[in-house]
Amino acid sequence: MKRTSAAIISAGALSAAALVAPVVATAAAPNSPSLVRIAGNVLPSLNQLTSVNAPAQKWMTVGVSLAHPDTAAELALVHRMYTPGNPDYGHYLTAAQVAQRFGVPGSRTTDIVAKLRAAGLSVAKPDAFGDYVTASGPVAAVERAFKVDIRSFTVTRSGKSALHFLANTTGPLVPAADHVVTVVGLNTLQRYQTAQDICFQGTCTGDTTPQDLWQTYDQPAQYTGKGVRMGVIGEGNPKNLQGYLDKQRAKYKLPHSTLNIICVQGSCGKDTAGDGEWEIDTQASLGMAPDANLTLYFAKSILDGDLNNSFVKWAHAANGPKLASASLGECEASPLNGVFNAPPLSTINGNTSSGTSAVLAFGNGEQAAIDPVLRSAVLQGKTLFASTGDTGSSCPLVYLPVIGAGNGLLNQGNPEQNYPAVSVNTVAVGGTVLYTNDNGSGAGASYKPANSETSRALETAWPFGGGGASLWTPAPSWQLKVGAINEPCVLPSNGATGTTCRGVPDVSAQSGDVLTNGYAVYGDGGWGPGGGTSLSSPLWMGMWARVQGAAGHNLGFASPLIYRAGSNATTYGRDFYDVTLGSNGLHAASTGWDYTTGWGVPKVAGLIRDIAHH
């Protein structure tokens, strides 16, 4: 389906306001020529909500993103680095080399740090890249630092308790000379959404085991990820996760594995509400690569200002894992820095808009802050696998003044994609429903697959698996020769009309259908199937760890290699199982690459032959 602006508007998502030229920053008042105001760092329609003065001592965490000095040179090097035959092909940089060649000048970072501290904020020591500065402190100090007014807002929700959040009512003022791209964390509404949680002791049945997937996805027994290091992007207190992992390892006769924990803000905090997500991530990735090593990069909360530190810590780590998985996301940002009005909405998750115009509250500059960080990871030959979400051919919206939606089993009608999955610096992973003929390789199987076989009975696209075309992000070079990737951008970030936009997912793996099948995971309450694209992304990371382990060296960013194998008629059939049944709303599965399952699900033995041993 070719995209037209009329088709987009009819999907109930965009207005003409979204199609005007982007504005990132505007000049401040005439008496402040050294400052600029960041436009778009304010949630719209706040004047429609009840508010009071924010508590002056309420604690907030913010992140200040500084522009890289030579983005064009970075992009050019990425292209050379991943183009076979180029002298730079496969020659990845170290973290120190990336920081030295492309990092932010120290004077700019130092100036921002000094101004934040002068306002009374506590500032974490920036790393050598200097492109992301984290600060925390009371509301009063945040207001001083950015010359903003922060209010406490209340939204009444039908049938639910009222929602309270803090938000700035004016855009932040920042030093013009420091080239600030965006400031995140100025409101406590916007946050990453995790994909589908685990289902325990309900109607869930038919869970697959690690050994089932070793066989179904053709994973050779001699390659188990030994020596490969993986990471998980997450948040909260991980105190329960090692014990849950031990239970799973013991039941399925997998070798003991000790989780490495990095609390990226010095402390992981007390939150354990996200355990269901992290149980899936740890037990899925290590289930596929039982001899790999896993590190958790955990922030204090899932709020943007906190969680961004997990991405930064992994991407900038000098000796960290080359692979990571992020089973979370939020709507991609528009060129208007993430906020625009929408037509009237009828009902969202049972909440009625009463005919008023709802507003899509997107990432508030999230993409502008994190994408350069992820690009620095690509320059180091790192790969982030990211879930495309559980809202079908839409993304997990947050609506104002009607607060609803979020991630979950609901296609929300807006054909935007999940970030960071939609980034050209990730491998986007969609979901499938997998039914197997299990002939005894389940809980009693040995560490290596038994002689008894588990085979695929049926695998289809999951109706709620994220997938589609970005509205704003141009397709990377490795997608341009794929005929099925043909949706033009509504307003491309490069400004060129007719530009083909990024398509997701790149690949897929089992998500289960959440209600009747999934992947066997142990957590609070016992055994149950984990599902959603939360499962698909760490499964792919674990399977790619087998490929990388078989190679015996770092293969670099995985996407160009995946597309080279998928685009070749000779290798495609032996490297991927083509999922051709099902849809996710706007898009149907079809032969070859499609907007529901990408290239399909892996045949790991083929990927090892054609990529690791090529």
Image: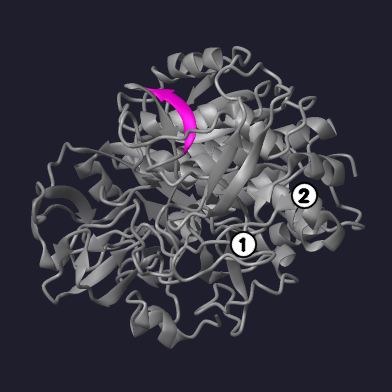
In the image, residue 203 above or below residue 372: above
Q: Is residue 494 left or right of residue 202?
A: right
In the image, residue 82 above or below residue 452: below
Front in this rendered view, residue 360 or 354: 354
Element under label 2?
helix
Residue bounds of the magenta highlight: 518-523
Q: Is residue 522 magenta?
A: yes
Task: Name the kind of residue labelled 2 in the image.
Answer: Asp
Quadrant in which residue 474 is drawn: bottom right
Residue 353, x across and y down, in percent: 15, 69
Front in this rendered view, residue 567 or 153: 567
Q: Is residue 41 left or right of residue 217?
A: left
In the image, residue 238 above or below residue 118: above
Label 2 belongs to which residue? 575
Residue 552, x across and y down, in percent: 83, 30
Front in this rendered view, residue 60 or 92: 92
Q: Is residue 566 left or right of residue 393?
A: right
Label 1 belongs to which residue? 580
Q: Residue at x 86, y 52 (%)?
A: 88
